Image (tube, rainbow, N blue to C red):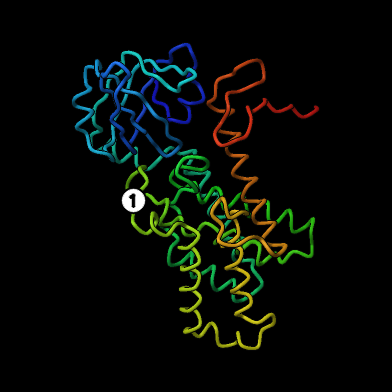
Amino acid sequence: MELITIAQLRQTASETPKEAFFYAQIQDRSDKTTKSGSPYMELTLADATSNFTLKVWSNHSQFTELSELPSGSSIRAEGHWSQNQYGIDGKNWRWRSLNESETEDFLRGDPATARKQQEDWDHIIAACAALKDPRLLALANKFLEDFGERFRRAAAARRNHHARRGGLIEHVSQMMRTASAISSAYPDLNKDLLLSGVLFHDCGKLWENNYPEAGFAQNINLHGEMMGHIALGIELVNKLWRDLLESPLSSSWGTLDPPSDLVRLHLLHLIASHHGTREFGSPTLPSTPEAFALHYIDNLDAKYEMLAMAYEANNELAPGILARQFPLPANPITPLRAFD
């Protein structure tokens, strides 16, 4: 029987059952009841590559055992897996808890994802090292030094895009590539400010969408729930800036142009406005070229990831037309191949 990742399961499962096993951590469990009154569970299972929701019916031979297993537990699930309009389903499947050796291998993540995220991390480091503004350079370096490991564990969202351990690294790195390209097309943009905005726009998600040191189930905490990542990001940048003002690094900042406090204010504006509209959580609206650019770069990368998720896992409703991927506004269409 083949060992696969959850991403591979989502890619290959179809109406024809596939025999395989996978390792997963229980990210969440909801106890529900059918219309006839029978209990069932919805398990959110996650690994380093992706996650999915699995319905477990009360007639499953291990239903009671599974219902007593706490969230965060790691399991091995094997059986015949298929995918329909309601998601991934298992037939004749069984589970067991992972042993110590299996757990160690599982927590290291699959090699392909680890390589991809290391490349993305290296790109972020290189992009930050190239910042010319000494204040933004010092701020980026301090952030990466103080919170780098936490940054590398964070997701970019709970479910809609890059909702996996290390997903924020992937999101920020790709946004930096796009920001660099757009800065070439629009040379009047302040590239240092825009790249710094990319780095810090979601830094509050280090608390809102973080993972423990060992696990693939997102932590839920009071700071994230009560403040949200935009407010947390503004607070973090202000704290790091104050710390830098008390260090020798800031000794020459008083003579720099533009003034240091104006640089800080523009960066805070990028964090505050990057959702674009108040209805989507921005406390203020984009008011500068860099703020508009950041908003659209963020939106583009999120939407591109959602499309990739749809092409990977969604059912085909008709030739070239896939089931809708929430929150995209319409059914995704298979993209046109490039002319050879």
Q: Position of residue 155 (x, y in %)?
A: 46, 48
Image position of 94 (left or right of 83): left
193 versus 95 height, above or below: below
Residue 105 horizontal/vertical position (percent):
33, 38
Q: Nearer the viewer, residue 212 or 288?
A: 288
**In this image, 70 relative to 129: left or right?**
left
From the viewer's perspective, is residue 333 above or below residue 163?
Answer: above
Label 1 CA crowd tier, 10 Å (few <14, some 14–19, many 20+): some
Residue occupying the point 53% across, 44% down: 116
Q: Is residue 95 left or right of residue 194?
A: left
At 61% from the left and 40% from the top, the residue drawn is 303
| Residue found 46% across the figure and 78% down from its top | 243
Left-right relation of 272 to 193: left
Residue 23: x, y in percent?
A: 34, 31
**Could you tell me the amino acid type at mark 1?**
Pro
* Residue 147 placement: quadrant: bottom left
State the residue lying farthest toward the top.
Answer: 16
Label 1's element?
Answer: loop
How many labels were placed on the picture?
Answer: 1
- Circle 1 residue: 212
Residue drawn at x 37%, y 26% as measured from the top left: 54
Q: Quadrant of the N terminus?
A: top left
The x and y percentages for residue 313 are 53, 26
Q: Is residue 225 above or below residue 144?
A: above
